[in-house]
Image (cartoon, rainbow, N blue to C red):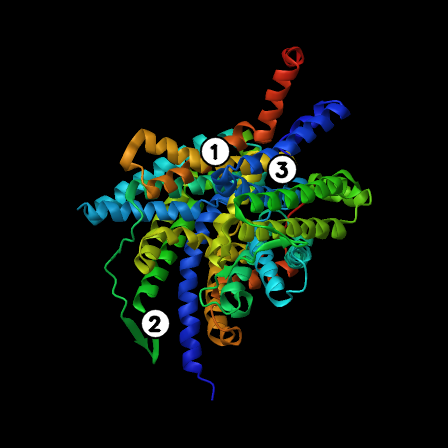
Amino acid sequence: MFDYQFLIEVLVGGLLSGVMYSLVAIGFVLIYKTSGVLNFAQGAMLLFAALTFVSLLERGISFPVAFVITLAIMVVLGVSVERAVLRPLVNQPPITLFMATLGLSYVIEGAAQLLWGTQVHGLDIGISDVPLDIAGVFISRFDLFAAAVAGSLVALFALFFRYTRTGLSFRAVADDPFAALAVGLRLPRVWASVWTASGIVALVAGLLWGARLGVQFSLSLVVLKALPVLVLGGFDSIAGAIIGGLLIGAIEKLSEVYVGPLFGGGIEAWAAYVVALVLLLVRPSGLFGQKLVERV
Amino acid sequence: MSAAPSTAQLSPSAGAFVIAVGAAIAFGAVPLLGFDYLMDAVLTPFLALALAAVGLNLLTGYAGQVSLGSAAFLAVGAYATYNLHLRLPQLPLLVDLVLAGLIAAAIGIVFGLPSLRLRGFYLAVSTLAAQFFVQWALTKFGWFSNDNPSGVIDAPVLSVAGFTFTGPAGRYVFSLSVVVVATFLTLRLLRAQSGRNFIAVRDHELAAKVIGVPLLRTKLLAFGVSSFLIGIAGALWAFAYLRTVEPAGFNLDRSFQILFIIIIGGLASLRGAFLGAAFIVVFPLILSRAGAALLGGVFDSGVLEMSQRIVVGALIIAFLIAEPRGLIALWDRLWRAVTRPAAVRNT
């Protein structure tokens, strides 16, 4: 007798945790789309944002004020990354930029923990994790909240890209950096604002993940969960990041429950990578990624 | 090998002389004078990391395939040597070592298969699969660690043809010999047709294909040889340096460390791999001494680790911006300035 209710529960749980992956992945996509950089430091930024926020809270600063201060710090971080790392490396091959962000992630992680210490902080954002009973299927209230936040963030970004001048310039740069330069867009300014935007995404994702796992070093490893999502969805598609996240979340949970026992469990760590790899062999630029055109 | 860098600019006989002096110092003076701490804490890990960096540099620097899974192959090498030694005790240690390298190479080729269709980031991400899979398998299946509950393995005694390498000096000489031989063979490989194929594939894959470089063979050869070298480096790291190993010691940070060695040392340069490894090993020691001297008690191990991360990360960025060819380019410039001051002024 196959337990369908359990299957649905696992599936929903997976999809909702996939939303959390998407949230991290969106930060990557924003930067990749506009500057062609795979920003490995996204996880470090997430850790930095969450750690700063929690430490401010613990020093008796109220929730909204701490949020605004952290936001301001992320803006400063975004602008200074553009100044110190991206601008001198302009026109370098993408893989060089990737390695630079690897270095950057070390700097940010080190700085975050040097400033605020390495102990684990609890973070309570006021959402109880009592499961909700919907037609006999238990769904975590926290997961629903996270999904709602992620959904509204994506909607906000969609509106922003569509209706604001800055959003339009983001799209122009993503489309063709040279043409964008030619019509007078300021590339450095666009990059600085896009890093700021992904800093904001990092803050939101950091708070949600931090509330789930506790704010600690392992938060920066969330980035490793987001990479297969990116591979699956394509590095340059926000829609791909969302669908990829949902898919990875669902596959991870389903395989852990139904395939994992065959291997003795614990396959969550690499199942997503294997799925992403298999897909890549069929579609080398992911589900929604732009086809790579190789110039000779 | 510390003398090898200069040979390019010297006449053959002078080069041979420099190598002879270097070998005499490395094999003779250092172990005989008995700098135990130096050999145990600095030179042996330096040799193991340098060999791993040589392996990764062949793959990333020469053949242009970025890999983030080096630590996985270190682990494969270490655990394969351990199991061969444990389960086939009749085999001599050197055969174990070579077989372990071949096992690492086989696994490297399997994880290198995606490189036929993937490039750049997509490939880098897919090599992470090797990292996670190997670490999981080693922790999960007790067989690999002879059912030790925590996956920890103890090192066998290093002995070749009845001669045992014990103590810091013995382990150092053993590592040095292995690294010298492996580096020499790698150098031969890189100077032959296969080495030029690597560079052709790195610089322009399509063009390489057009002039008849077999892409499939070249890429898989790069993955295979690279994993072979890294596997042997893993065995050295485990048995000559740490003498006890657990899977957690081969985590992602170790992979990044090896990548950082070749970025700092210099991509596509074997000498760079050695310079970079020397830097990565010596730098934390200097930093901890300097930090303790300047800041005293405030500079505890936590602060040390964090400031080390910051400085290493910042150095990576600085090198990529200011000298993408790494320490080795600085070294060459310095060498030219010392030996031919006039030539430098003219250029």
B326 or B120: nearer the viewer = B326
Chain letter for mark 2: A
Badge 1 and badge 2 in a common chain: no
**Callout 3 secondary element:** helix
**Callout 1 secondary element:** helix
* Amino acid type of the residue tagged 3 in the rendering: Phe
* Residue B218 image position (x, y, % from top left): 74, 49
Reading the image, the residue beneath label 3 is B27
Q: Left or right: where does residue A121 sit relative to residue A10?
A: left
Q: Residue at x 39, y 45 (%)?
A: A45
* Residue B73 image position (x, y, % from top left): 59, 54
Chain letter for mark 1: B
**Callout 2 secondary element:** strand
* Amino acid type of the residue tagged 1 in the rendering: Leu
* Amino acid type of the residue tagged 2 in the rendering: Ile
Q: Nearer the viewer, mark 1 or mark 2?
A: 1
Q: Residues within 10 Å of mark 2 (few under 14, many from 20)?
A: some
Reading the image, the residue beneath label 2 is A139
Q: CA distance from mark 3 to mark 2?
A: 66 Å
Give residue A35's mark.
none
How many marks do you count on the picture? 3
Name the quarter where the C terminus of chain A is drawn. Answer: top right
